[in-house]
Image (cartoon, rainbow, N blue to C red):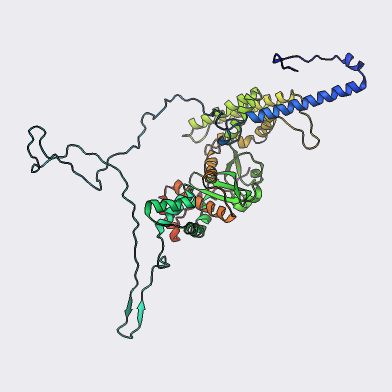
Amino acid sequence: MLDMSSHTIVPIPVLSGEVFETLPEPIRVYIRYLESRIQQLETRVHELEAKLSKDSSNSSKPPSSDGLKRKPKSLRGRSDKKPGGQQGRVGKGLAQVNNPDIIVTHTPASCTGCGSNLDDIRGSCAEQRQVFDIPQPQINVTEHRVEEKKCPCCGEITRALFPENIKGPVQYGDRIRALIAYFSHEHFIPVDRVCEIFKDIFGVALSPGTCANVDERLFANLEVFEAGLKAYLLAARVLHFDETEMRCEKKLHWVHVASSQAAIFYTMHAKRGQEAMNAADILPKYQGIAVHDHWFPYFAYNQMKHGLCNAHHLRELVFVHEQEKEAWAKRMHDLLILANKEVDEHADLGALSPEIVLQIEQDYQQILTEGFAYHASLPPLPTGKRGKQKQRDGKNLLDRLNEKRDCVLRFIHDCSVPFTNNQGERDIRMVKLRQKIGGCFRVFRGGEIFCRIRGYISTARKQGWNIWDAFADAIRGSPRLLEVDQAAAPQAIAV
């Protein structure tokens, strides 16, 4: 018990079995009840303390949940490199150009020595300095006219046709509409502020309805791109998958992402699990290697191999070691980092040697055995009224590392498989940024439009396309398409 006056722990006296048996039955029942209740409360206190100690460094909680008081803690180890730019790095600073657009020559009017007039004296360039600036933006108005001509033979009057994209007496051009979409879907600027930007910078009075029409047009024109995007991703050897919540129609929805280093596909659904994954129509058909977290619905698709995100495991191992004081977790943490380092060092060879792989697997099994033995020595947690026997966090992690060891160690058997799912997590993070800046979606249609357009612009950036030009092409109805190499598409994999 706690002595509140001295703040020291006072040991609880222990009753011997003989003394306990001499007590009246009601007192013995009450003591047993107190023991059980104390155990339950101690377990509850431990759970609450563990919950409070979790942050982005030792769990899957996002960094935004850490608050301002908690000092961020990186999982990255110290390197032998000095801070700042490394030797041999090529800088990207501003540099002079050979052919400037405008040249302004400054000549001296008189001699600084004797004061003689130098206007008629020809000078030479002693030094040049260049200023990079943006000219005053100006809207160009192009007027299209159609002529009529009277045939000299029959007298029929024939009128020329306007280009197909010229619909009305007055309209915005493709590049203005592309810039509207760029502000909205690349930088998530709300519609009202987009209108303010065009008014302040270009002197154009946009309306929110115009912005909405641009989105609708892009959504329709990008349907063919999205179909090709799915085929392109299905042909990839390795894909990353993730999902995050998004508020839509005042309800919780989920945005799912499937991405590679060269393309991204987004989709929104009211559900998080397999129903949404089937609707996206990528996971049910994919036959390569899927990298993701350990969320159970992903394993419903057994026509492909799975690779688990070890960044999640490292954070959980940090928690089990630092908060639960389990020694095996530190050894497993160090082993995974060492294995990843070995893969990086042998990246040029494309694979680890069989001896290194065998040693990693043996060390892995030894650490698991040590961890299971430790938990077998602990007393079981109090049983609930129903459901499965509750386990400690460390035991749950051990079970996963044991049952999914092939998925955990996929990266040491195939060097094309990343150690983490950082690719998928970076690609899905833009959805949270959109929600913070632009808010939620009032209607489901808005979420569909965002996902399709965002998939196009994110893929364009990964492909190295000019974003403004790519948007203008899509506005015209001819979006840029991805070329699918069917010969490189992964075949069905035996798991």
Image quarter in which the N terminus is found? top right
Image x and y of residue 219, in percent: 51, 57
331, above or below 91, in the image: above
Is residue 359 in view? no
397, above or below 455, in the image: above
| Depth order, front residue of 241/185 | 185
Image x and y of residue 281, in percent: 60, 53
Image x and y of residue 53, in percent: 63, 28
Is residue 481 in view? yes
Q: Residue furthest bottom?
A: 154
Q: In the picture provided, is 72 more to the left or to the right than 30?
A: left
Q: In the picture provided, is 18 more to the left or to the right than 216?
A: right
> Residue 166 falls in which quadrant of the image?
bottom left
Looking at the image, how many numbered discs can be counted on the residues? 0
Taking the spot 44% from the left edge, 55% from the top edge, the residue there is 480
Taking the spot 65% from the left edge, 36% from the top edge, the residue there is 404
Taking the spot 64% from the left edge, 34% from the top edge, the residue there is 405
